[in-house]
Every structure is written in C-alpha cells, then in structure tokens.
Image (spheres, grey):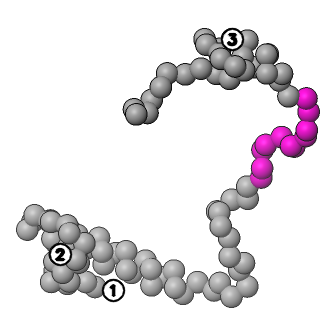
C-alpha cells in the first residue's frame, strides 16, 4: 500500500512528530513498507490457531508455597541496628 507525502505530514501532525523536509520521503517509504507487510500478514490463514499471550510457553519457576516455621521476633531483630518494644526502630520520615 502506497502512502503519500501529505498523509505522512498529517500522521506526523496527529502524532506530534516533526520531520525535516528531506526525511519525509524516507518516512513515506518506511510507512508504505509497514502497511504492505501488514497486508501480507492479513493473508495468513489463522482459522484454527489458538490465541496466545506469549510467543513461547512459560512455566512458573517459583518453589511450592509450603508452610514452615517462621523466625522468632528476637531472631528477626537480632541484627537490627535499633529495636524498640519488639519492632524495628527507623528514623521518622513524616513531619508533624
């Protein structure tokens, strides 16, 4: 499909792009090539093809979520720079 220089200028205006006058012809050819390729893709028979979310199959690589014993409060606070009343003590970040 051939696209004209006027159409390129209109597309540039609508998409807030600015092309130097000597680049309009190159952009015109590129857009025409893209549209021609899209026409070629439209001819593909996709009648029995199932839609996919990804180009390749994905599998979950995370471990199984198995419940286990958690850290005690003392153990969790063991390496804390500061602790107070069983909690991590951090600098105040919100002003009054």
Identify the secondary structure beneath mark 2.
Answer: helix
Q: Within the magenta stretch, is there residue 92?
A: no
What is the magenta segment's predominant secondary structure? loop
How crowded is the residue under tag 2: few (<14 C-alpha within 10 Å), some, or many (20+)? Answer: few
| Disc number lying in front (1 or 3) | 3
What's the distance in space between the residues labelled 1 and 3, CA to CA? 67 Å
**What's the residue at 61%, 13% (across, down)?**
82
- The answer to the question of whether label 2 and label 1 lie on touching residues, with beta carbons closer than 8 A, is no
Q: Position of residue 69 (x, y in %)?
A: 91, 29
The range drawn in magenta is: 59-69
Q: Disc number at residue 92?
A: none
Query: Does residue 19 appear to the left or right of 35 in the view shown?
Result: left
Q: Earlier in the sequence, mark 1 or mark 3?
A: 1
Quadrant into which the C terminus falls: top left
What is the C-alpha distance between the residues marked 2 and 1?
21 Å
Residue identified by numbered label 2: 13
Numbered label tally = 3
Q: Is residue 87 visible?
A: yes
Q: Earlier in the sequence, mark 3 or mark 2?
A: 2
Residue 61 in magenta stretch:
yes
Q: Report x, y in % for residue 29.
A: 25, 73
Rendered residue at 77%/50% (across/down): 60
Q: Position of residue 32 (x, y in %)?
A: 30, 78
Callout 1 secondary element: loop
* Residue 8 is at least partly visible in this image: no
Question: At x 73% / y 55%, what residue is drawn?
Answer: 58
Picture disc at residue 79: 3
Query: Which numbered disc covers residue 1?
Result: 1
């Amino acid at each position: 499909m051939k696209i004209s220089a006027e159409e390129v200028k209109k597309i540039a205006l609508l998409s807030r792009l600015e092309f130097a006058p000597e680049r309009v012809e190159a952009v015109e050819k590129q857009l025409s090539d893209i549209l021609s390729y899209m026409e070629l893709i439209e001819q593909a028979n996709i009648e029995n093809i199932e839609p996919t979310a990804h180009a390749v199959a994905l599998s979950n690589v995370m471990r199984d979520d198995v419940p286990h014993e958690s850290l005690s409060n003392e153990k969790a606070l063991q390496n804390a720079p500061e602790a107070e009343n069983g909690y991590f003590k951090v600098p105040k970040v919100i002003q009054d």
